């Protein structure tokens, strides 16, 4: 940013036109055309600049707009109005430095004015609260008439009642040196009701102190405490002189409150707020940091930092290097100037570990991180209670308990959507109870004149419309957690009764669900570490996948279904990231279940083990995915409330490391259906379809020895096709599946399960055991 040095000279105000300009444009400063072009690159006036004393350590910087002088000036001379010069504390003849900020001065989000003592030092009486709206209207009218509002600007001789009063601007956008454009009905105007002076009772009043602290945010107690601790440390400066305060990264899943916290920081009014967007160019990022240093105290907010340094960005490395240099530059100022700059840098991302490059995690950069978890039961209750459920008071506590317990995986944004949906449902319900033909009150006033008779006091007053708990329960069916929108939350509605036989398999999986839902204190009485991983193995077509679907349907757990081969069909490194993200999301929405179908495709044996031709698909990618899977299953982050279920037809191809305790604790053999299971399959088919009396189920059970459940269903389907063809041929007179149809289908159905295959499973069982 370009800077030039000047000496202050008086700007003459002689004519009435000059006086009007001074009132409307008090913070304009003037230089000659050559200096204007050199500083701003243009002859056009109105660009934002800052002005500060030369040869003064930590000099206060004031903001203004730069214009071409109306009279001939030397290049080293600047002119400004006396009122602005006095408010800034500059003297005639003093040397100052003007630095171009680029662009225009900002709009004012907030302006604070206080009563000013009279010239004799006496204090006016406090403003009565009932008079405050009138004063606000008068002050806002004055502020909207000037080009830019700067701190120290005085509004003289206003009158509502009593003595005339004068006011002084003490803060603009939370800064005692601010300058911005006041926008009527948009800028927040704060008027102090009591007169305020400095300690001596003379000179400009001090602005209200703005505290860099966040309060009143529901459901984020622990992260909010950590953030406020960091903010207090930032304002304090640290006990060690060498301490440099780093940037802060707030990270967590979508909808957990990251952007809300950034906006809350912006609204503290502590300093000028600068935002870096992920589309900003490199030069814009650098300019933002430089401007923030010139307009201290300031806050730089970077929402979605991971998108700013996205891998698809062509100059990603240059942006990362620039951020490193800019953060290092803030830290270096402490050693050169003796105190740290009042520039707070806060960013957000989804995952600090994977989204932030190592270079940006070095000391003094983005080393402070705050994780926003999914709200727990108590957090969800706090959030819901802050949303005003609008139900009868005697029903609110019970509804809060029910909703907070049944909304796991919902973030704060989801809970707001839930409340809004319930409001729509309740409003529709309420309107449906009204008489359709009766006009609304507004329509009545339009269609007929007001009645001349007095209102009938005997008519019952209509009860105020409220929501009822059923509105929220209905909304729950419509509003799903956003974290799960791309996940198979609704597996095919398979129930345990749909699976014939397999009693031991069902017993093991039901126990797995109960374990995932038990409180930790109960589990501690029986387990050091309860089993979390369950492997279903056996011949193809024997209901392994159906068992997983039934487990998800009956348990109500959030269900993540993944085919192993799909994870490998990705770019290098993406498969491992997908596995980590899968486990992270399962933890966030626990209780949940991850189901890996065909797990052998990603967890094959690594080289060095014998027996299998499948060595992690013969690729380093498969090995990396396996390593990631092993780390996630028994790593440092416990899988509380997460069940991991997998299925394979080829258990001998699995890496033995996956079968150690703490990973897949239970190995469950899903065998071909026995006699009772086969009988149940044929009986269920007979109950749904028309069977002729000649169908002998006992004979069918005997003839299908060694067939899988899928093959038996295929036999029944083929018999149904034969019966349908006969039905069409006979003109609709011959209805029903005959025994001959089934016997013919059995002969044509090739048995996929061989004796050698069964022996292979038996050999593997003897080596690793089974349930």
Image: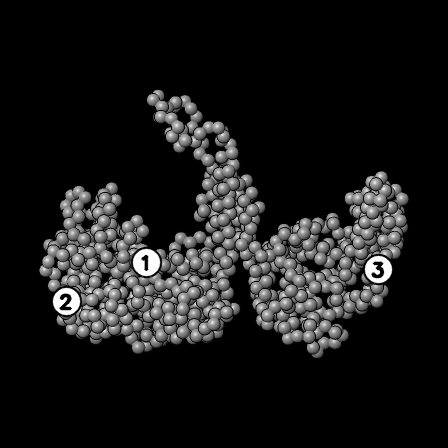
Query: Which residue has dot 2 on it?
Result: 71
| Mark 1 vs mark 2, CA separation in Å | 39 Å
Mark 2 residue crowding within 10 angstroms, few (<14) / some (14–19) / many (20+) = few
Q: Earlier in the sequence, mark 1 or mark 3?
A: 1
Disc 1: which residue: 269
Between discs 2 and 3, the one toward the N terminus: 2
Rendered residue at 88%/52% (across/down): 743
Report, in whole angstroms, how far the alpha carbon at label 2 lies from the one at label 3: 103 Å
Q: Position of residue 307 (x, y in %)?
A: 47, 65
Give the quadrant of residue 94. Answer: bottom left
Tell me if mark 1 has few (under 14), some (14-19) or many (20+) residues whose alpha carbon lies within 10 angstroms of its own.
many
Residue 108 makes an appearance in the image: yes
Mark in the foreground, 1 or 3: 3
Which residue is the site of mark 3?
750
In space, the residues marked 1 and 3 are separated at their CA atoms by: 77 Å
- Secondary structure category for the residue under label 1: loop
Q: Residues within 10 Å of mark 3 (few under 14, many from 20)?
A: few
Is residue 259 toward the left or the right of residue 78 in the image? right
Dot 2: what SS? loop
Sequence-wise, which precedes: disc 1 or disc 2? Answer: 2
Residue 481, x across and y down, in percent: 54, 53
Pointers 2 and 3 in contact (C-beta within 8 Å) = no
| Front residue of this view, candidates 17 and 163 | 17
- Tag in front: 2 or 3: 2
């Amino acid at each position: 940013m370009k800077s030039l040095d000047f000496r202050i000279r008086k700007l003459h105000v002689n004519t009435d036109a000059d006086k009007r300009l001074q009132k409307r444009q008090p913070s304009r400063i003037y230089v000659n055309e050559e200096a204007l072009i050199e500083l701003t690159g243009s002859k056009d006036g109105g660009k934002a600049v800052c002005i500060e004393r030369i040869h003064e350590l930590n000099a206060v910087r004031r903001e203004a707009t730069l214009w071409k002088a109306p009279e001939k000036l030397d290049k080293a001379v600047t002119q400004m109005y006396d009122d602005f010069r006095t408010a800034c504390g500059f003297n005639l003849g003093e040397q100052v430095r003007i630095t171009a900020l680029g662009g225009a001065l900002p709009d004012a989000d907030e302006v604070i004015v206080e009563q000013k003592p009279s010239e004799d030092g006496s204090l006016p009486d406090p403003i009565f609260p009932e008079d405050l709206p009138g004063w606000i209207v008068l002050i806002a009218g004055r502020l909207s008439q000037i080009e830019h509002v700067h701190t120290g600007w005085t509004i003289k001789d206003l009158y509502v009642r009593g003595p005339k009063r004068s006011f002084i601007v003490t803060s603009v956008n939370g800064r005692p040196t601010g300058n911005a454009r006041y926008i009527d009905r948009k800028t927040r105007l704060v008027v102090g009701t009591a007169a305020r002076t400095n300690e001596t009772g003379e000179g400009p009043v001090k602005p209200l102190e703005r505290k860099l602290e966040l309060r009143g945010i529901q459901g984020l107690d622990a992260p909010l405490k950590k953030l406020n601790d960091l903010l207090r440390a930032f304002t304090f400066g640290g006990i060690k002189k060498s301490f440099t305060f780093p940037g802060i990264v707030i990270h967590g899943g979508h909808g957990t409150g990251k952007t809300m916290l950034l906006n809350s920081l912006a609204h503290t009014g502590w300093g000028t707020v600068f935002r870096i967007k992920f589309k900003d160019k490199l030069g814009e990022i650098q300019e933002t940091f430089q401007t923030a240093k010139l307009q201290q105290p300031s806050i730089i907010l970077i929402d979605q930092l991971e998108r700013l340094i996205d891998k698809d960005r062509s100059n990603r490395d240059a942006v990362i290097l620039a951020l490193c240099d800019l953060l290092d530059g803030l830290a270096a100022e402490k050693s050169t100037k003796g105190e740290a700059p009042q520039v707070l840098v806060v960013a957000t991302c989804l995952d600090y570990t994977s989204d932030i490059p190592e270079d940006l995690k070095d000391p003094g950069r983005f080393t402070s991180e705050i994780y926003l978890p999914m709200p727990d039961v108590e957090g969800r209750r706090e959030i819901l209670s802050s949303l005003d459920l609008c139900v009868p008071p005697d029903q609110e506590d019970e509804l809060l308990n029910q909703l907070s317990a049944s909304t796991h995986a919902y973030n704060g944004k989801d809970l707001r959507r839930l409340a809004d949906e319930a409001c729509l449902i309740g409003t529709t319900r309420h309107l449906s109870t009204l008489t359709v033909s009766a006009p609304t009150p507004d329509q009545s006033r339009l269609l007929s004149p007001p009645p001349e008779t007095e209102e009938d006091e005997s008519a019952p007053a209509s009860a105020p419309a409220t929501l009822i708990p059923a509105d929220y329960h209905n909304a729950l069916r419509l509003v799903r957690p956003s974290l799960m929108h791309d996940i198979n939350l609704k597996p095919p509605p398979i129930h345990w009764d749909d699976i014939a036989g397999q009693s031991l398999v069902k017993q093991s999986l039901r126990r797995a669900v109960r374990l995932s839902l038990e409180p930790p204190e109960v589990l501690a009485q029986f387990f050091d570490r309860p089993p979390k991983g369950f492997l279903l193995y056996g011949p193809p077509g024997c209901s392994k996948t159906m068992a997983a679907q039934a487990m998800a349907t009956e348990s109500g757990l959030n269900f993540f279904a993944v085919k192993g081969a799909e994870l490998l069909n990705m770019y290098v490194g993406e498969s491992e990231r997908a596995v980590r993200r899968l486990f992270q999301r399962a933890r966030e929405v626990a209780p949940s279940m991850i189901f890996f179908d065909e797990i052998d495709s990603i967890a094959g044996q690594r080289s060095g083990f014998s027996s299998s031709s499948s060595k992690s698909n013969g690729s380093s990618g498969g090995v990396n995915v396996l390593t990631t899977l092993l780390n996630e299953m028994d790593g440092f982050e416990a899988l509380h409330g997460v069940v991991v279920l997998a299925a394979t037809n080829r258990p001998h191809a699995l890496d033995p490391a996956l079968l150690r305790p703490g990973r897949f604790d239970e190995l469950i053999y899903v065998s071909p259906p026995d006699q009772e299971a086969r009988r149940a399959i044929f009986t269920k088919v007979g109950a749904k379809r028309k069977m002729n009396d000649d169908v002998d189920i006992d004979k069918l059970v005997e003839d299908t020895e060694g067939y899988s459940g899928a093959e038996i269903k295929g036999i029944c389907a083929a018999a149904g096709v034969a019966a349908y063809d006969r039905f069409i041929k006979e003109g609709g007179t011959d209805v029903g599946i005959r025994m001959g149809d089934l016997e013919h289908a059995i002969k044509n159905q090739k048995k996929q399960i061989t004796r050698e295959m069964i022996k292979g499973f038996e050999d593997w069982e003897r080596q690793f055991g089974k349930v």
